[in-house]
């Protein structure tokens, strides 16, 4: 049995991704269903438009910052560069994870095992080698966490601003980080404002400035389409396909142009979501354990979101290795097993109903898909509850 | 030239002589009794007589067609195949009053047509195009008859009533043509593939020319030059019938029973149905290009190009409940295993995500060039092309008590487009119908050969109609009374549970900071939970 060392782990993760990559190339060529994600073609098309001097938004359904298309410009020469970049992002995330574990003082052999949950996770490797950009985001979040743990505040601020610009949701980490930054030189004395310290101010200013700079620059170059596709679309979208969220069917029904069936609840959905993931959980838990807090915040954000697709799971899986050590789910193996099983089965139930609808044309919207989304929601709340109590 | 020219053509398919003998012509009228014939009427009205001048300002070319959904016979020389429904083409050279145009369309043509403004139209390379599946002609006939009451007179009102049963009707206005016969004139056409006609057609006058012809086709082939002969009379002018014989090169031709096609959606339907068109029969191009050898013995013809080069096409009309992903279709064109050779164009609403109630346009159209099969391995056995197009249905409007909606999609049109030697030959014919339509996608001088619909294996609903029905699942609105409260309850209970669990942790640790009171030391306690100490 090979010894689990850092080199071996990183090496195995890399090999795994290389293998998946070549398998993907083979499947693309020879099978009817492509391995490569449709999103990858959206990104590369957008890069192509950009390379020709145009806007990435010329490509329909490109809903990201232009920076992503810019990062993928080399795909115009070597088409699979994007997949390499995303896979590399996975690996960098894993490596930084190990650095964070070291700072936290977790023994190396344990750290390697928990980091393997991410690095050797086939689901993670598949998502990156299929050309989905979630791995890159995971790298950004871990890098942010590492910077905070290493007390490199300016870098952390820049990374936070960058991550929020990329995908809105990392903004929930800002309150947590700010809340956790105790033990720094106080600026406004010991009275009412004793919480104002150097680190907090530095972090807040740098992250805000980075975000404004990046967003402003992109707006300056690409104008309104940038705001529309990167941000506004996500705030108003009401996809009810491939959507695990409990709001799924409610969104479908209330989006039709009929006065009697308008529901105000979908527009209020952000209230419980943002309150729990952005205010309540940071407040209650960030001072106890920042990394674990970020895990439950993300989990809550995804669970209460109006739209939830399988890519969103990556957002919290990247933080799962921090939660697992000393978690109730590992101390009680059956609990952990039950949680994993129920989470998977609830998804499988949804997928089965979804398959009936999309490929067999049966109206499984109600009760089928609706019940499946609620069941999945309940399972997630149960898991979230365990984790929250645990911290 | 008279400002109104009215022409009735009756094409008789057998016993021409006997039939011709039953017609009675005199100075005032022509009458016929029980004549079985294909009938084509054409009415050309000078633009001055039109009442919609304000509406037509800025419009360069206009065409309104109403086509029956039945698989009616396209007798020669009327082989032009048109998708069933109502088609409105508008080509403008100045700003058109689109809103007023839509209002007029709804009030004059058919109130069931969805039209709000320019956004309802699909922009084709040659015109703005509005399509609707409605085929009821009564509203437009009532409008025509009341608005043009004085212009066309009593006699024509009787003939207009016939139009209600016509298989095809068209109104075309072309201000851009060079042809003096048609420039700035409204051309109204109606076609009946068959009927037993008992009619009395009255004479016209100086301003209004009435002509009737009884013709028969004199050659057998469907796809070459056509020769017609028979008798004509301008009622009021001719005391007796005038014999006539003429031939012409038709622009539109049909391929005959040897080449047919049949489209349908593959089961199971799902939300991403695959549309399969099976094209079968003699798939060799109707024309081949060849060059006469450059040799003295061929005299003037030496070195000349003859025949034509043909390409195979399929034209889809997709109402907005269904659409294609243009990226997916271009992949098909690149794939070697697909029958699609090239995407000529996809026009209209191609958004991949919006629901059907947010689509302004009536839908989209798609023109594809298809791979031509090579020469048949065994002649006489026929070849087959399986043209499969992946389509997607839009999110549909749900309704009470129903779990699915069914929408009709018209059959695509499959045809060869061949460039023939000379355009001028084609327009010399008296039946050339060149106005806005599929022919506008091709350069002048292109002849179109249509595949015949194969009705023997069509879907079981509406057996004679050229329609494919698609069933799309929706949510029954009764669900709403459960969905809203249960969703809200689930969310609220979820929140409360999380608050409760956080409270338990808070109570156990005595607060929100790092120090855990009352917890026995263990190995994990040494793990640092937050950023490095300063």
Image: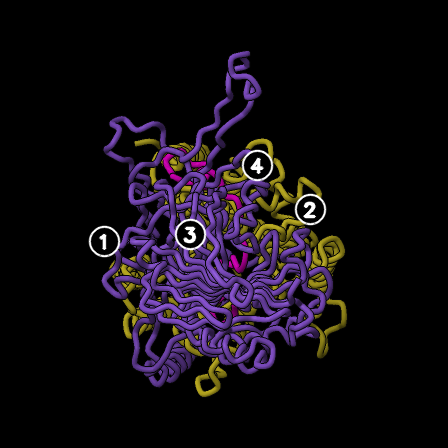
Chain colours: A yellow, B purple
Q: Residue at x 57, y 36 (%)?
A: B422
Within 10 angstroms of label 1, few (less than 14), some, or many (20 or more) residues?
A: few
- Which comes before the other along the chain, label 1 or label 3? 3
Residue A329 rendering spot, x and y as whole percentages: 33, 60
Q: Residues within 10 Å of mark 3 (few under 14, many from 20)?
A: many
Please identify, in this view, whether the residue under mark 1 or under mark 2 is nearer the observer: 1
Circle 3 sits on which residue?
B230
Instruction: Give SS at disc 3.
Output: strand
Q: Position of residue B404 (x, y in %)?
A: 31, 71
> Residue B476 appears in which quarter of the rendering?
bottom left
In the image, what residue occupies the spot 57% across and 55% down?
A: B435
Task: Check chain identity for marks 4 and 1: say if they share one.
Answer: yes
Distance in Å between CA atoms under marks 2 and 3 = 64 Å
State the residue position of label 1: B456
Q: Which mark is residue B422?
A: 4
Choose mark 2 or mark 3, whichever is in front. Answer: 3
Q: Are marks 1 and 2 in contact (CB under 8 Å)?
A: no
Packing grade of label 4 (10 A; few <14, some 14-19, many >=20) is: few
Q: Quadrant of residue B398?
A: bottom left
Q: CA distance from mark 1 to mark 3?
A: 35 Å
Boundaries of the magenta span: B331-359
Instruction: Residue B249: say if magenta.
Output: no
Which residue is painted at 39% across and 77% down in the image? B494
């Amino acid at each position: 049995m090979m010894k689990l060392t850092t080199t071996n782990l990183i090496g195995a993760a890399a090999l795994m991704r290389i293998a998946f990559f070549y398998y993907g190339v083979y499947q693309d060529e020879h099978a009817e269903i492509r391995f490569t994600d449709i999103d990858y073609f959206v990104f590369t098309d957008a890069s192509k438009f950009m390379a020709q001097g145009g806007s990435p938004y010329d490509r329909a359904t490109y809903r990201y910052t232009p920076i992503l298309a810019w990062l993928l410009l080399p795909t115009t020469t070597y088409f699979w560069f994007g997949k390499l970049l995303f896979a590399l992002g996975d690996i960098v995330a894993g490596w930084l994870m190990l650095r964070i574990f070291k700072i936290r003082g977790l023994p190396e052999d344990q750290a390697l095992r928990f980091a393997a949950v991410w690095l050797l996770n086939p689901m993670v490797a598949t998502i990156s080698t299929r050309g989905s950009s979630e791995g890159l985001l995971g790298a950004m979040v871990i890098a942010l966490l590492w910077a905070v743990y290493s007390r490199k505040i300016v870098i952390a601020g820049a990374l936070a601003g960058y991550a929020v610009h990329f995908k809105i949701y990392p903004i929930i980490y800002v309150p947590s980080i700010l809340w956790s930054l105790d033990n720094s030189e106080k600026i406004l004395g010991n009275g009412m404002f004793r919480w104002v310290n150097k680190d907090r101010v530095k972090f807040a200013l740098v992250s805000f400035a980075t975000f404004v700079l990046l967003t402003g620059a992109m707006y300056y170059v690409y104008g309104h389409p940038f705001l529309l596709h990167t941000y506004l679309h996500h705030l108003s979208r009401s996809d009810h396909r491939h959507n695990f969220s409990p709001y799924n069917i409610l969104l479908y029904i209330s989006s039709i142009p009929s006065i009697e069936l308008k529901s105000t609840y979908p527009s209020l959905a952000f209230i419980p979501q943002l309150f729990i993931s952005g205010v309540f959980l940071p407040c209650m838990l960030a001072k106890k354990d920042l990394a674990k807090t970020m895990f439950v915040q993300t989990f809550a954000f995804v669970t209460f979101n109006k739209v939830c697709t399988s890519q969103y799971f990556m957002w919290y899986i990247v933080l799962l290795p921090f939660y697992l050590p000393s978690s109730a789910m590992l101390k009680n193996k059956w609990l952990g097993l039950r949680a994993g099983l129920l989470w998977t089965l609830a998804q499988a139930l949804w997928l089965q109903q979804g398959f009936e609808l999309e490929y067999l044309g049966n109206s499984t919207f109600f009760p089928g898909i609706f019940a499946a989304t609620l069941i999945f929601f309940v399972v997630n709340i149960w898991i979230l509850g365990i984790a929250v109590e645990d911290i | 030239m008279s400002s109104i020219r009215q022409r009735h053509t009756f094409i008789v398919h057998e016993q021409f002589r006997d039939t011709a003998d039953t017609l009675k012509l005199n100075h005032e009228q022509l009458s016929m009794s029980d004549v079985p014939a294909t009938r084509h009427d054409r009415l050309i009205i000078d633009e001055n007589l039109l009442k919609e001048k304000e509406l037509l300002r800025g419009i360069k070319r206009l065409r309104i067609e109403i086509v029956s959904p039945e698989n009616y016979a396209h007798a020669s020389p009327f082989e032009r195949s048109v998708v069933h429904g109502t088609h409105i083409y508008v080509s403008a050279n100045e700003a058109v009053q689109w809103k007023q145009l839509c209002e007029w369309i709804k009030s004059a043509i058919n109130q069931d047509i969805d039209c709000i403004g320019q956004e309802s139209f699909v922009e084709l390379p040659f015109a703005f195009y509005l399509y609707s599946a409605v085929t009821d002609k009564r509203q437009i006939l009532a409008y025509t008859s009341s608005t043009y009451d004085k212009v066309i007179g009593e006699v024509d009102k009787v003939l207009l009533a016939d139009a209600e049963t016509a298989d095809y009707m068209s109104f075309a206005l072309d201000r851009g043509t060079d042809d003096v016969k048609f420039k700035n004139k409204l051309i109204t056409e109606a076609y009946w593939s068959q009927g037993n006609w008992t009619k009395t057609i009255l004479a016209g006058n100086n301003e209004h020319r009435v002509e009737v012809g009884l013709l028969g086709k004199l050659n057998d082939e469907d796809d070459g030059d056509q020769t017609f002969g028979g008798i004509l009379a301008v009622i009021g002018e001719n005391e007796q019938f005038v014999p006539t014989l003429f031939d012409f090169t038709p622009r539109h031709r049909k391929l005959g029973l040897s080449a047919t096609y049949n489209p349908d959606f593959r089961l199971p339907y799902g939300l991403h149905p695959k549309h399969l068109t099976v094209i079968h029969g003699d798939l060799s191009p109707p024309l081949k290009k060849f060059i006469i050898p450059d040799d003295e013995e061929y005299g003037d013809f030496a070195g000349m190009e003859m025949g034509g080069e043909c390409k195979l096409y399929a034209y889809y009309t997709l109402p907005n409940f269904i659409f294609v992903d243009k990226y997916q279709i271009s992949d098909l064109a690149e794939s070697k295993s697909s029958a699609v050779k090239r995407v000529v164009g996809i026009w209209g609403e191609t958004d991949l995500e919006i629901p059907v109630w947010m689509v302004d346009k009536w839908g989209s159209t798609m023109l594809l060039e298809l791979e031509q099969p090579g020469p048949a391995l065994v002649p006489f056995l026929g070849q087959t092309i399986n043209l499969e197009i992946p389509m997607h249905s839009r999110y549909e409007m749900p309704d009470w008590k129903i779990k699915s909606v069914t929408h009709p999609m018209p059959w695509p049109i499959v045809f060869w487009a061949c460039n023939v030697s000379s355009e001028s030959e084609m327009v010399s014919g008296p039946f050339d119908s060149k106005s806005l339509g599929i022919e506008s996608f091709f350069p002048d001088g292109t002849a179109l050969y249509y595949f015949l619909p194969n009705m023997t294996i069509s879907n079981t609903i509406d057996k004679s109609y050229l329609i494919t029905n698609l069933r799309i699942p929706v949510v029954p609105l009764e669900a709403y009374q459960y969905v809203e409260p249960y969703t809200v309850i689930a969310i609220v209970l979820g929140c409360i549970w999380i608050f409760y669990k956080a409270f338990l942790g808070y109570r156990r640790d005595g607060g929100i900071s790092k120090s855990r009171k009352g917890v026995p030391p263990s190995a994990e306690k040494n793990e640092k939970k937050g950023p490095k100490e300063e």
